[in-house]
Amino acid sequence: MAIGSKNLAPAELDSFEDSRLTDELRRAKEELFNLRFQSATGQLEGHGRVRAVKRDIARIYTVMRERELGIRATPAPAALPEAKPKRSRKKADDTAAETATEETN
């Protein structure tokens, strides 16, 4: 992708959850507003960035709409790793004592 944000490639957007997509959309809209403001006041140096941000917004809207229609799969929420049950020292000490008594017998 030559134009646009490098972190908002379509393959990258597929891995985002819906809440993260809405956050990225909000950030892109804020950036577009700031760029338009800079353009109106004559402070904008690179006009290509406006086009790139517009494409990012369109890309996000496309992914969101495709998920609504079921064309694109929604990523499964990241599951928390299951905690292993902790062994108490008492059990470990008991098993060590049992093996020691078995070895002596």
Image (cartoon, helix red, strand yellow):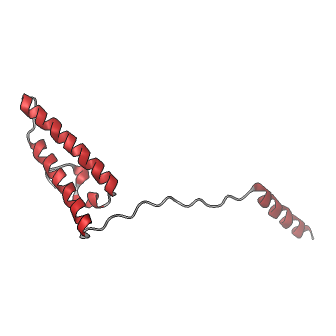
Quadrant in which the C terminus is drawn: bottom right
Nearest the camera: 44 or 20? Answer: 20
Residue in the image at 16% along x and 54% along y = 58
Query: x%, y% of residue 43?
Result: 10, 29
* Above or below, 22 relative to 97: above
Query: x%, y% of residue 26?
Result: 25, 45
* Above or below, 7 relative to 79: above
Q: Quadrant of residue 45?
A: top left
Count of labels shown?
A: 0
Residue in the image at 21% along x and 62% along y = 65
Residue in the image at 24% along x and 59% along y = 64
Q: Residue furthest front?
A: 68
* Above or below, 83 relative to 48: below
Query: x%, y% of residue 4?
Result: 17, 49
Nearest the camera: 6 or 71? Answer: 71
Left or right, 98 with respect to 78, comes to right
Residue in the image at 8% along x and 34% along y = 39
Query: x%, y% of residue 67?
Result: 26, 65
Nearest the camera: 53 or 71? Answer: 71
Left or right, 81 with respect to 72, comes to right
